[in-house]
Structures are given as C-alpha cells and as structure tokens.
Amino acid sequence: MSFGDASAARGDTLRVPCLVNPDHVDIVEHLDRKRFVWIDLDEPSDVDIEALAQSIHLHPLTVEDARTFDQRPKVEEYEGYLFMVVFGVDPETESGGALLREVNMIISGDYVITIHHRPIDSLAELRARYSDQPIRSEQFLVYKILDAVTSTFVPTLSRIDDDIDDIEEQILDEAAAENLQRIFSLKRDLVAMRRVVSPMRDMMAHNSDVIASLPGLGSDDRLYFRDVYDGLVRTSELVDSYRDLLSGATDMYLSTVANRQGEVNKQLTVIATVFLPLTFLTGFFGQNFSFLINHILNTLWSFLAFGIGGLVMAVVGFGVYFRRKRWI
C-alpha cells in the first residue's frame, strides 16, 4: 500500500508538506514519514537531480529528461510514476520576450515533484496557500499544480486582447511603423503559446485517466483533469482568434498605409499637372526669337495677356477640372 492509500484508508485529514529546494536528508526524512509531499525544485543543479533520483529511484531516462529543458509537452509512464512536461507563461514578460515557462513534473502516489529553471509566481502562491491547509486528496493537489501552471495563459491573453484593441485604434488614427512592430511582437507571443498549448490540450485529452489512475493517488473526481483540458481548449481557441485579429490588424495597417500613399501620389500628380502647362508657357515665351520678341511680346498688354494671362488661365482651368473630378 502506498502513502496515499494509507492516508485514505485511515481517513486522516491530508496535509501536504511543500518543500522548496530541499536537501537529500529532508527528502528522505519526509518520505520515511509515509506522507505525501510536494517537492519544488527551482533552478536545480545536476547534483540536486542526481540526489533526488537516488532518493526515489528514478529511471535514468527520467533523470535525463528532468535535466533537459526546451522540450515539447509530453507524458511518459514509468513503473509507479509519470513524467510530464507542461508549460505556462510569465504574465509580467513584455511582448516579444521569453514568455514561456517550462515545468517538468514527476507524479506518483507518494509525491509530486516540480522542476523549473525560472521562478513561477503561480506555484509560489499555491505553495503558500496549501503549505498548512488540509486538502481533500493527493489527486486534488496534482490538479491544482497543473491548473496553476496552465492558468497563467489567461492574464497574458487578456493583455494581448487589450493590446490588439489599442493597436487597431492607433492604426485608424494614424498608422505608424511602431504599430507593425507591436503586431509582430504579439504574433511571436501567440506562435510561442500555440506551439505548447495545442500539444498540452491533446496530452490532457488522452492522458488524464492515466494520471488519475496512478497507484496511491486514491479515487477522486476525474472532472478535475477534465477542467484542465477544458481550460486548454479555451486557451487554444483564444490564441487562434487573436492570431486572426492580428492578421486583420496587419491588413488594416497595410491598407491604411497604401491609402495614405495614394493620397500623397494624388497630391503630387495634381502639382505636377498644374506645373506642366506653366512650364510649357514659360518655356515657349522665354525663347529669344526675334519674331516673338519684336512682333508679339513687344508691348505691355501682350505680355500681360499671353504671358501672365496664360499662366493664370492654366491654373484656373486645372483647378475647375480637379474640383469637378473631386480630386481637391
């Protein structure tokens, strides 16, 4: 009979010690007490993992996986325990930064171990909450750990939603290059999340019963793990929706920039068209031919009529034409 089965058989109130970076002696002491324990290793060294492996007799492949980060979400079943890789995010990370937080988990009826290389606030809050409070079962604690890690996507996606609304408003007011940079940063965040959320969703869909059936975790409501799966489904749908919104924002930005360039081109075309006849007239009447100077532009009225008058008439004529075409 495992530790969890023993506590369930006695009907005792289950209190789970939460150990952070314990040494080998503490681990052995708690395991000898026949109590379910949560061991949280934050930035452990290879020596720490080796000591842990000797204390609970881990398979060499598990030891290798526990040392390795930047893996894909997965579940591997061993004799008496499971090894899981799950991901969360850091809501405080700026857009475009290192957003993902990987957690390696070892789950059995005697203990649950979490291994991560960066601090995770949600796990720290969970430890503080249940360090001295009774819980209904070991299975419930495993669910709360999974829920604490995967729920970190929610505030990050809420921030992305607000950023998308802000970007769309700025693009409508005045599209700038900074808007496109923010769009690309948010897209990188969503691509990173989608890379881990979809596999975790499929992992929980196919392996939640395996987790719940571990010897020693006792019999509890398996809807806990279904709740984790439902949360990952909603997260996956939100990631896909926000990617579509960002694609729409990109199209809006490109359309706005193209319209602005069209307006600029139209204005330049109007100016060039106005100066075309002016250039022709000044060039023609500026020729130093004796006939033109002696017979046509030899008086004040001819200069005003043909010279100045022609320029004024060209400008007025094009102004009337452009207004009828609604170009100005």
Image: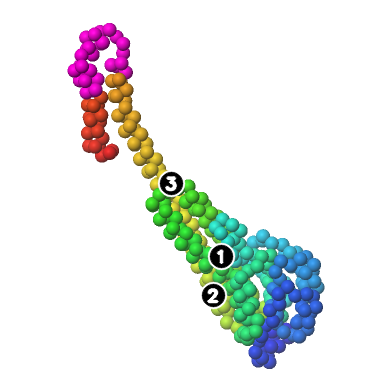
* 6 left or right of 233 in image: right
Residue 1 image-quadrant placement: bottom right
Q: Nearer the viewer, mark 3 or mark 2?
A: 3
Q: Amino acid at mark 1?
A: Pro
Instruction: Tell me the residue that label 2 is attached to.
Output: 227
- In front: 177, or 69? 177
Cα–Cα gap, marks 1 and 3: 30 Å
**Which residue, given by chain and number where applicable, does mark 3 sit on?**
254
Categorize mark 1 by other alpha carbons within 10 Å: few (<14), some (14-19), many (20+). Answer: some
Q: In front of the other: label 1 or label 3?
A: 1
Q: Nearer the viewer, mark 1 or mark 2?
A: 1
| Residue sitting at x 23%, y 30% | 316
Q: Is residue 101 above or below residue 135?
A: above
The x, y position of residue 271, in whole percent, is 33, 32
Amino acid found under the numbered disc labelled 3: Leu
Can I make out residue 143 in this image? Answer: no
The disc labelled 2 sits on which kind of residue? Asp
Q: Quadrant of residue 326?
A: top left
Q: How far is the residue under mark 3 from the one under mark 2? A: 41 Å
**SS assignment at label 1:** loop
Please report the bounds of the magenta region as a residue range. 283-310
Q: Secondary structure at mark 3?
A: helix
